[in-house]
């Protein structure tokens, strides 16, 4: 099939960890590559965010990234992109009318991509598959007045969910939210994200430690909802352990986390190492005794899977996709969000038991390898595409 992936703000060419560059960028890049391995012809459409961007870039065999001229050719926060989605969608439609390459199916990633996809695809009878990656109702529930999303987001998401031919939920919690939004359960496909099992492995070099302290590693963009402050507040309950936090941060957020560490008298045990290149991450995971993933909420969460694929146990908050990937008391421990005391006790208990960590590590590695390969994910997504295409054909021939 010819497959168009729409990812308006999250380019597969961007380096994860920067502002508005995270799990969606990684997901789109890996999914495109895995679908190409299945023999499909993939084009990824993302907004042109710089004047020097070439119109088309060959990402790999079978995958081309197309930079769409929608809005000014400069970086913009994703929450500022809504006014340009009409132009994005109209450009796509005009391009497909004029080009010899027209997609058989369009897969939109994030809600604003869904608006552009429906604008372009619906008048041309092309089926649309939607992955939200995050839902406005969940973000509003957890962030309240701090939510910077456009006020129209929740209404648009409901409409997109009802108009799309198929909606891919990445976890059971998201599927339940979609049903509550009015998306017919029959049109929802549950397909988790994947992990690069060639890169993230238990075998290979590990970052050297300077001392004998057990190491807790946490990875992600340093934003408040990721729970790094709560992790630091948990350290007084975990004597002697060091906490390494990897991820890009604004100067203000890094300063805030250091202030939290000083207030808890653990500043000598907290290291903020900044953004780490993807290729270097496996060595950091291997260096850790336990990986902590403790967001307030999480649509899916790739870092626990990366840790599991490296054979590391995970202590995670019992939210969103982490409820699916981390099996409590089997591959790791689940704790309530925003509860430093319970988190600290879970980390201390795990660090004190070599046998428990070994058991969790073995189970985590097995789960990552058997359930979360990108090949498995791509095959399930491909099935959703074929269902959407088949439903359109059936509707036309009635």
Image (cartoon, grey):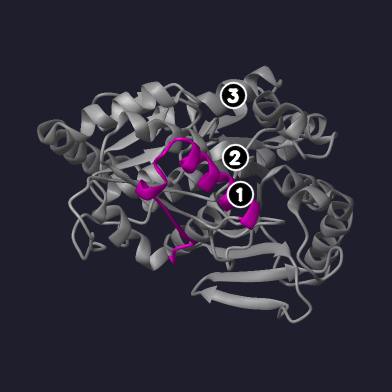
Identify which residue is drawn at 49% across, 37% down.
263
Which quarter of the figure is the N terminus placed in? bottom right
Residue 357 visible here: yes
Determine crowd level at label 1: few under 14, some 14-19, many 20+ residues with C-alpha closer than 10 A: some
**Is label 3 or label 1 in front?**
1
Assign a secondary structure to mark 3: helix
Residue marked by disc 3: 186
Residue 324, image quadrant: top left
Q: Is residue 42 above or below residue 304?
A: below
Q: Which residues are magenta?
A: 250-277
Q: Is residue 11 above or below residue 392?
A: below
Which quarter of the figure is the C terminus placed in? top right
What whole-number distance in Å separates the C-alpha atoms at marks 3 and 2? 36 Å
| Location of residue 79 in the rendering, given as x and y in whole percent from the top left corner | 78, 48
Q: Can you tell which mark lies on residue 224?
A: 2
Q: Are marks 2 and 1 in contact (CB under 8 Å)?
A: yes
Assign a secondary structure to mark 2: helix
- Is residue 261 a member of the stretch shown in magenta? yes
């Amino acid at each position: 099939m010819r497959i168009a992936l729409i990812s308006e703000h999250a380019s597969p060419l961007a380096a994860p960890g920067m502002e508005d560059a995270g799990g969606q960028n990684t997901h789109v890049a890996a999914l495109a590559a895995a679908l190409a391995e299945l023999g499909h012809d993939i084009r990824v459409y993302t907004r042109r965010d710089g004047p020097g961007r070439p119109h088309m870039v060959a990402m790999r065999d079978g995958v081309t990234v197309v930079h769409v001229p929608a809005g000014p050719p400069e970086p913009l926060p994703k929450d500022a992109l809504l006014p340009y989605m009409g132009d994005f969608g109209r450009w796509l439609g005009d391009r497909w009318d004029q080009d010899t390459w027209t997609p058989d199916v369009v897969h939109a990633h994030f809600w604003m991509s869904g608006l552009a996809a429906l604008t372009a695809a619906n008048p041309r009878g092309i089926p649309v598959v939607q992955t939200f990656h995050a839902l406005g109702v969940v973000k509003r529930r957890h962030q309240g007045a701090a939510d910077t999303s456009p006020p129209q987001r929740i209404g648009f998401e409901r409409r997109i969910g009802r108009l799309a031919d198929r909606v891919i939920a990445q976890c059971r919690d998201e599927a339940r939210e979609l049903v509550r939004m009015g998306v017919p359960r029959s049109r929802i496909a549950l397909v988790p994200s994947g992990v690069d099992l060639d890169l993230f492995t238990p075998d290979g070099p590990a970052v050297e430690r300077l001392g004998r302290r057990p190491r807790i590693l946490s990875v992600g963009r340093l934003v408040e909802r990721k729970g790094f402050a709560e992790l630091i507040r948990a350290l007084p309950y975990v004597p002697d352990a060091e906490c390494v936090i990897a991820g890009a941060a604004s100067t203000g957020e890094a300063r805030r986390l250091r202030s939290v560490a000083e207030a808890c008298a653990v500043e000598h045990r907290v290291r903020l190492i900044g953004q780490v290149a993807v290729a270097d991450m496996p060595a950091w995971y291997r260096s850790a005794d336990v990986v902590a993933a403790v967001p307030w909420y999480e649509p899916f969460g790739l870092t626990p899977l990366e840790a599991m694929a490296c054979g590391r146990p995970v202590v995670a908050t019992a939210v969103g996709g982490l409820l699916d990937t981390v099996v409590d008391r089997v591959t790791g421990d689940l704790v309530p969000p925003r509860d430093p005391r319970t988190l600290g006790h879970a980390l201390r208990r795990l660090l004190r038991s070599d046998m428990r960590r070994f058991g969790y590590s073995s189970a985590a590695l097995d789960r990552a390898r058997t359930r979360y390969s990108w090949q498995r994910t791509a095959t399930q997504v491909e099935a959703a595409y074929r269902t959407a295409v088949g439903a359109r054909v059936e509707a036309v021939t009635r």
